[in-house]
Image (spheres, helix red, strand yellow):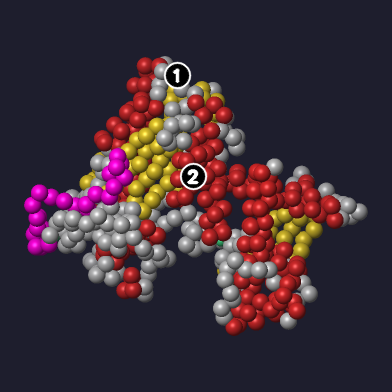
Amino acid sequence: MTRALELPATQLGPVNSHSACHTAIDRAARPDYRRWLDHVASVRGCERPIRLAGHLHTINPATGEVLSSRPTETLPDGVIYVPCGDRRASVCPACAETYRADTYQLIRAGLVGGKGVPDTVATHPVVFATFTAPTFGAVHTRLVDPKTGKVKPCRMRRSIERCPHGRVMTCPHRHTEASPCLGQPLCSQCYDYDHHVVWNAWAPELWRRTRITADRQLRSLERTYGVRLRLSYAKVAEYQTRGLIHFHALIRLDAIDPADPDTPLPPPLGITAADLDQVITTAAVSTAFTTPPHPSNPDGWLLSWGAQLEVRPVSFTGALTDTAVAGYLAKYASKSTEATGHISARITTDTIGAYADMATHIGRLVRTCWTLGHRPDHEHPADWKATYGRLRRWAHLFGFGGHHTTKSRRYSTTRTALKAARRHWRRVQHHTRRAQHDTANHTDEQTTLIVGNLTFAGIGYRNTGDQWLALTAAAQAREQRQIAKEERNVA
Ligand SMILES: [Zn+2]
Ligand SMILES: [Zn+2]
Ligand SMILES: [Zn+2]
């Protein structure tokens, strides 16, 4: 039992299950415990790492020569652990934090430069735009007066209005942020669920067409100034409580040198954020299209943006600074449908019954996706999977199957580049540590490459005791890094 005293103090609460406690003690009592802990530290507190088994080869990248090979059987647990990489904080807090931090770096580099982006981008006109969905029926909302900061009544009319189903369509309440009726329709029968989920499903296409329209709008600015221009952007999708997607986008105007199109140049001084605002607003207002026919709506659904388009300039000093915007967008990158109170994995024929609760708004959204995603006559046209068939696949996301974070190619650096930089930094650290310990037996490993011939062996730790130990150690390491960072800041 004395080994148990060496267990790191937990930030995760007590080990609540008896078996977890036993497996943790067993693990910690093993002679290779430290080696095991070092081995799992590479996933940095991932909740459910992927286990891979096979062979690891050390290669000389210059010659391609295999310097050595070893089976993963020689490693603790006989596998290597790889982080799950899920961006959702509700699934894996540690991987979501990595994703959020990377998103922040990506977005910020596009605003102020760095990470291979020229510093001059800081002088380009930039706007922060929010593209919302139209309304598909009255819902309870929390309205805050921007001038007084006071909450306004939800939905007031001069006289009491009733819908065709006899329901009162006014609501005098000033809802709190925790109010459970937020986002719920005043009459679920009046609410257009079909249009709602179809809008979510085609929102990425609406964005794509809006971009094309905006590019066309740029042509007249190009003619006026005799220069080639391009819009670069980073955008994040966010779920509103009513279960609709909206997009937050940072849009930057670049000038292009045709001889070197990859390097963004500052546009002529005469072009301002107001010109950019004009381009975006015109594109958003004028873009609309109709979806393909569906048995329940042979004319298709008309898709456009909602009236609440918001375009604001971003600057170093104004109300909306680059750091604030980057932080704001990065926060949304690690979220999914949490704001709606629903979170689930992909829905199947076995689980649809549990999720499609017709008594709730979210249940009705899921049910609508499920119904529209399948033809009762089973006569699915060839493009069904790429059109309405997607609604079943994305029912747990209320129809939206697009990427949550996207950026145009030249906006900034890439996630892969950030990952490579992190890996390199860790390798340098590891080798520095190793060199300090092991100067006598020095090999120039920094010039070698490790590649794996690996297959999937499972997900997660081998038992809850292992998980507890690994997550506790990672939490402690995180805390130590934080303390070191604070000390650096003080010094
Ligand atoms: Zn993870
Ligand atoms: Zn209300
Ligand atoms: Zn009604």
Residue at image mark 2: 327
Distance (Cα) linking label 2 and label 1: 28 Å
Q: Choose mark 2 or mark 1, whichever is in front.
A: 2
Q: Residues within 10 Å of mark 1 (few under 14, many from 20)?
A: few
Quadrant that contains the N terminus: bottom right
The magenta stretch spans residue 163: yes
Is 193 situated left or right of 442 in this image?
A: left
Can residue 346 be seen?
A: no
Can residue 20 be seen?
A: yes
Q: Residue at x 55, y 47 (%)?
A: 102
Quadrant in which residue 68 is drawn: bottom right
Secondary structure under badge 2? helix
Q: Does 268 sit above or below residue 432?
A: above
Q: Does 150 sit above or below residue 347?
A: above
Q: Residue at x 40, y 60 (%)?
A: 338
Circle count: 2
What residue span does the magenta drawing correspond to?
Answer: 145-167
- The x and y percentages for residue 439 are 88, 52
- Amino acid marked by disc 2: Gly
Observer-nearest residue: 34 or 160? 160
- The x and y percentages for residue 322 are 48, 36
Observer-nearest residue: 457 or 10? 10
- Amino acid marked by disc 1: Leu
| Label 2 with label 1: CB-CB less than 8 Å | no
The magenta stretch spans residue 305: no
Secondary structure under badge 1? loop
Rendered image: mark on residue 269:
1
Q: Residue at x 9, y 55 (%)?
A: 160
